[in-house]
Image (cartoon, rainbow, N blue to C red):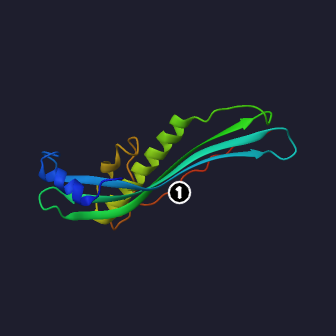
Amino acid sequence: RQPDVKAIITRIQKGEFKGADYVLFGVISSIDFTDALSPLQGTTSATRQYGLQLLADFSLINTKTYEIKAAFSAQGEGNDTKILSNRGDIAPPNRSKVMKETSMSLAQDVYQQLAGQLGYTDANLSRGVRRGQPMPMQPAGEPVRQARPEQVIILK
């Protein structure tokens, strides 16, 4: 059982987030692991694709007024693909890579959702999420959504 907004407000009232102006609270609404083996046509090789998709619902709560200033859903995803030379090969997926990619893409989506709802125009606010690269903004102050680059595997 996951806590709800009332439980977080109770924790704020008890002083658990002393000194904070806002608390960002999230609940996982969907988590989906995938693990698929796909033969490569015309070969004895195959690919193993391991992935994680996570969807969470967030609320940004003002610690003084208990008002919900923003509410949104954000998603993150990560994957690892291995090429197996023989269909009987064993190649464990890199779970830490998948978790890291998922958490990074979730954090980026959370930032974009917050920036869009609250109207933040300071591109430097995303520095921690974007590894030092400022997020491009539209003239209206909304973040420019960029397509994620696709992973390309060249087989010879």
* Quarter residue 144 falls in: bottom left
Q: Is residue 11 left or right of residue 100?
A: left
* Quarter residue 143 falls in: bottom left
Q: Is residue 36 left or right of residue 119?
A: right
| Residue 8 in view here | yes
| Residue 143 in view here | no
For label 1, the SS is loop
Looking at the image, how many numbered discs can be counted on the residues? 1
Q: Quadrant of the C terminus?
A: top right
Residue 66, horizontal then vertical, whole percent? 16, 61
Residue 35, horizontal then vertical, whole percent? 64, 45
Q: Residue at x 17, y 46 (%)?
A: 17
In the rendered image, which residue does mark 1 sit on?
147
CA neighbours of label 1 inside 10 A, class few (<14), some (14 to 19), many (20+): few
Task: Examine the rendered structure and indicate whether residue 94 appears above or below residue 26.
Answer: above
Most extreme residue toward the bottom is: 140
Task: Examine the rendered structure and indicate whether residue 58 appears above or below residue 15.
Answer: below
Task: Examine the rendered structure and indicate whether residue 139 appears above or below residue 126.
Answer: below
Q: Residue at x 72, y 42 (%)?
A: 47
Q: Is residue 29 left or right of residue 151?
A: left
Residue 7, horizontal then vertical, whole percent? 23, 55
The amino acid type of the residue labelled 1 equals: Ala
Q: Residue at x 44, y 45 (%)?
A: 104
Q: Is residue 46 left or right of residue 105?
A: right
* Quarter residue 6 falls in: bottom left
Most extreme residue toward the front is: 1
Residue 80, horizontal then vertical, whole percent? 60, 41
